[in-house]
Image: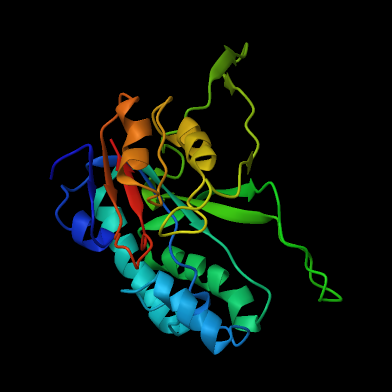
Amino acid sequence: MEWNKIYNEDCIDTMRRMDAESVNVILTSPPYNKSRSASYSEESLATRQGHYKDFNDARSNEEYIAWTLERFEEFGRILKDDGVVCYNLSYSTDETWMAELMWLVVAEVIKQGIFTIADVIVWRKKTATPNNVSPNKMTRICEFVFVFCKRESFDTFHGNKKLISISKKGQNIYDNYYNIIEAENNDGACEIHKATYSTSLCFQLLDRYGVTGGGVSCTIRSWEQELQPWQQSNIRWISSARKSPQNTAIMPITALA
């Protein structure tokens, strides 16, 4: 595999060509499988499915979980023992299954046995659409980034917390980091996506778990914009996303070494 390159393909195909234990961080955000919702009209559903031309965004829970686990199996193969997967996932309270699916996915990833939860980062966005039609459900201004590590590395996975002192008893004391990141909702619209992924979020995640100073925008806005942050960094990377005039980036991943 050639490093410092974007592959215009499904991430599963990219990962299967990568060497085992070759990356330190995997950063990704999958489709949320929301097109099953009865709240979508036929017209809006057709538009939404058009965003995912080569991807079924209306799977059953069982199908979506199986699709996820297949990718986590490859994550486990290419990730170094002290590496992490930063997995951005969200939910909706429009319907019961939409409120449950995110938690079912996380539970099944843990049950798979390769990974466990190292931490959960709350991504607080700048704005949110008010939920003024529900008498009991809150306006959701946050999403989650689930930080997975290999189960055997729960106490030893890599992080960039700064050592600030050593106690009289020899205990290392580290700088304090809260499990919340405030970042823009997205990087704006482009010709194929109305809400490209938040570069600010990526930079802050990499500051915590990757190489300090590195950064990436996962969802492609343009090849040039995708490459720009990497060309200014001192890390090796591989990025994978499907892109066409009728298709957004499907399950984009960025792997860093």
Tell me the residue at 60%/88% (across/down). 38
Tell me the residue at 57%/83% (across/down). 37
Task: Give how far across and how far down residue 65 sits, in percent.
Answer: 42, 75
Q: In the rendered view, does 126 fall on the left or right side of 185?
A: right
Which of these two is toward me, 208 or 31? Answer: 31
Q: How is the image coloured?
A: rainbow
Residue 170 seen anywhere in this rendered image of the structure: no
Which of these two is toward me, 138 or 38? Answer: 38
Task: Give how far across and how far down residue 177 sits, in percent.
Answer: 62, 32
Residue with the most extreme front position: 191
Q: Quadrant of the C terminus?
A: top left
- Looking at the rendered structure, the number of numbered marks drawn on it comes to 0
Which of these two is toward me, 236 or 78? Answer: 236
Q: In the rendered view, does 134 fall on the left or right side of 253?
A: right
Task: Give how far across and how far down residue 158 sits, in percent.
Answer: 41, 34
Q: In the rendered view, does 192 fall on the left or right side of 104?
A: left
Tell me the residue at 53%/76% (across/down). 34
The correct choice, above or below, for 190 with respect to 159 in the image is below
Tell me the residue at 22%/37% (across/down). 4
Task: Give how far across and how far down residue 144 sits, in percent.
Answer: 58, 55
- Which of the 4 image quadrants contains residue 49? bottom left
Residue 204 seen anywhere in this rendered image of the structure: yes
Q: In which quarter of the image is the N terminus?
A: top left
- Which of the 4 image quadrants contains residue 212? top left
Which of these two is toward me, 180 or 253? Answer: 253
Residue with the most extreme right position: 135
The correct choice, above or below, for 161 with respect to 97 in the image is above
The correct choice, above or below, for 174 with respect to 38 in the image is above
